[in-house]
Amino acid sequence: MKFDKATLRERFHVAQSEKAAVEAAVQPLIDQREALIAEMRPMQERLDALNEQLKDAREPLYELSVEIGAIARFLRDPDGKTRV
């Protein structure tokens, strides 16, 4: 490719038309994807709400696990084994 203004100007216009053709070919896929995302949005909102409830419900499990671990460390024998 020559790098003079006329050649670059021509390539610029060819590249723009190629880009437009690719965008036109890709647009149906983008539309399908956006439609699918729109269908999934209500489910995602329900899932987010459920995950928030699950997070709140699991909080006592974490605190109990920490407490059990602390008790187990306290009950260790000198050999390092826990005797509960």
Image (cartoon, rainbow, N blue to C red):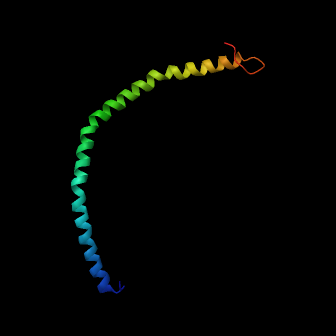
Q: Is residue 75 above or below residue 2?
A: above
Residue 35 quadrant: top left
User: Could you tell me which residue is drawn at 61 percent across and 18 percent down?
Assistant: 68
Front-most of residues 75 and 82: 82
User: Could you tell me which residue is drawn at 51 percent across and 19 percent down?
Assistant: 60
Q: Is residue 69 above or below residue 14?
A: above
Going by the image, does 19 lie left or right of 83? left
Q: Is residue 27 above or below residue 76?
A: below
Relative image position of residue 61 (x, y in whole percent)? 52, 20
The number of numbered badges drawn on the structure is 0
Q: Is residue 58 above or below residue 1?
A: above
Relative image position of residue 27 (x, y in whole percent)? 23, 56
User: Could you tell me which residue is drawn at 29 percent across and 81 percent down?
Assistant: 9
Q: In the picture, which quadrant includes the N terminus? A: bottom left
Front-most of residues 84 and 6: 84
Relative image position of residue 4 (x, y in whole percent)? 34, 87
Going by the image, does 12 lie left or right of 63? left
Residue 64 quadrant: top right
Relative image position of residue 54 (x, y in whole percent)? 42, 25
Residue 56 quadrant: top left
Q: In the picture, which quadrant includes the C terminus? A: top right
Going by the image, does 18 lie left or right of 75? left
